[in-house]
């Protein structure tokens, strides 16, 4: 049964900023500018009209609770933007471009597999692979006469062999996705242990042991999943470029290693480094 929830007077919520900043792959823009996505066992359409955000769709539970959790609605992003914009003018400028960004609480398992697929890949291709996997191994949900598919569970995806995964267009990632799926399947409490661990480095090191998870993918998982480590600072070519231009333009010959970038992120942005990264990333791409 379709449900609806309206969020009134929300400044820090722009669907385009949230869904186009590289953190998620299952949301697509519609002709009317709204976005429809699948997460968990939910299919939801999100539209912003003036100062109202309208959520509607079919949900596995109460739509208000589901949206509050997934869209991180209980967190005060106005306060975060105020704190970050006081760091320097670059940050202030970048926030203007992505002022409606919110970091989603995505299911850990789906985030792990999605970002393994994202390695050396482009967004349309990543989306296509995830859609094909969901269609083949997930469950169908019909809403407004359209078919949607849930992301496969560990058990559902474990039925796919390396060859099966290759047929879905994963390329060199097929073996990595297969092996990581087997780790989740055999270690039933792997996810639980990650969520219970408090030490940031220990969580990151556990993620780095998964096939296909390098430092950047680990940081994406830490930031964009229910692990919700806002200090994680994913480093890619865009971030290297923007940080070089903003903070190291006098030192053109400096080799910007990940260690240098992580140190800068920690010193400048502290516990909010991940959100700062999203504003910088979105600004660099949009501007």
Image (spheres, rainbow, N blue to C red):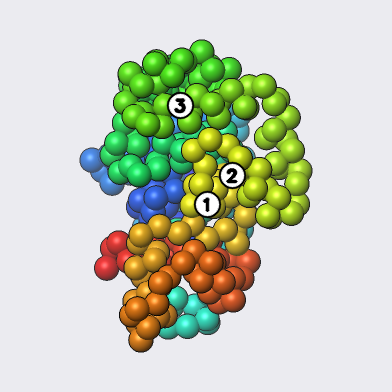
Tell me whether circle 2 and circle 1 mark residues in contact (CB < 8 Å).
yes
Judge whether 39 appears above or below 207 on screen. above
Q: Nearer the viewer, residue 149 or 239?
A: 239
Mark 2 surroundings within 10 Å by alpha-carbon count, few (fewer than 14), some (14 through 19), many (20 or more):
some
- Up-down relation of residue 225 to residue 86 (above or below): above
- Residue 39 in the image: state x and y as whole percent: 49, 33
- Please report contact status of discs 3 and 2: CB closer than 8 Å, yes or no: no
**x 35%, y 59%: residue:** 237
Residue 229 in the image: above or below residue 152: below
Residue 96: image location, x then y, percent: 38, 71
Give the quadrant of residue 230.
Answer: bottom right
Q: Which mark is residue 175?
A: 3
Q: CA distance from mark 3 to mark 2?
A: 16 Å
**3 or 2: tag closer to the N-terminus:** 3
Read off the residue under disc 1: 215
Quadrant into which the C terminus falls = bottom left
Query: Is the residue marked by circle 1 packed among few (<14), some (14-19), or many (20+) residues within 10 Å?
Result: some
Residue drawn at x 66%, y 43% as measured from the top left? 206
Does residue 139 show up?
Answer: no
Residue situated in front as seen by the camera: 115 or 286 = 115
In the rendered image, residue 194, in percent from the top left (x then y), is placed at 70, 41
Whole-percent x and y of residue 143? 39, 23
Label located before the other in sequence (2 or 1): 2
Q: In the image, which disc is placed on residue 179?
A: none
Rounded to the nearest angstrom, the CA distance separating label 1 from label 3 is 19 Å
Element class at badge 3:
helix
Identify residue for label 2. 208
Question: Can residue 165 be seen in this snapshot?
Answer: yes
Disc nearer the start of the sequence (1/3): 3
Which residue is painted at 55% across and 76% down in the image? 268
């Amino acid at each position: 049964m379709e449900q609806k929830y309206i969020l009134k007077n929300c400044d820090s919520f722009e669907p385009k900023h949230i869904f186009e900043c590289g953190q998620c792959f299952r949301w697509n823009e519609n002709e009317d500018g709204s976005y429809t996505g699948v997460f968990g066992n939910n299919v939801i359409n999100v539209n912003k009209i003036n100062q109202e955000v309208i959520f509607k769709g079919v949900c596995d539970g109460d739509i208000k609770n589901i949206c509050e959790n997934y869209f991180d609605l209980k967190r005060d992003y106005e306060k975060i933007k105020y704190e970050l914009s006081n760091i320097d003018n670059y940050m202030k400028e970048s926030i203007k471009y992505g002022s409606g960004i919110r970091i989603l609480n995505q299911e850990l398992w789906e985030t792990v597999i999605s970002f393994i697929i994202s390695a050396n890949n482009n967004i349309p291709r990543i989306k296509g692979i995830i859609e094909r996997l969901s269609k083949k191994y997930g469950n169908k949900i019909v809403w407004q006469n359209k078919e949607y598919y849930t992301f496969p569970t560990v058990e559902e995806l474990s039925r796919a062999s390396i060859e099966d995964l290759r047929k879905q267009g994963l390329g060199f990632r097929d073996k990595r996705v297969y092996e990581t799926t087997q780790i989740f399947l055999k270690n039933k409490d792997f996810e639980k242990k990650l969520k219970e661990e408090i030490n940031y480095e220990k969580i990151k090191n556990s993620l780095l042991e998964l096939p296909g998870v390098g430092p950047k993918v680990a940081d994406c998982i830490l930031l964009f999943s229910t692990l919700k480590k806002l200090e994680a600072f994913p480093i890619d070519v865009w971030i290297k470029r923007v940080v070089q231009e903003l903070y190291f333009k006098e030192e053109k010959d400096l080799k910007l290693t990940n260690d240098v970038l992580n140190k800068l992120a920690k010193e400048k942005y502290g516990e909010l480094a991940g959100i700062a990264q999203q504003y910088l990333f979105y600004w660099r791409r949009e501007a």
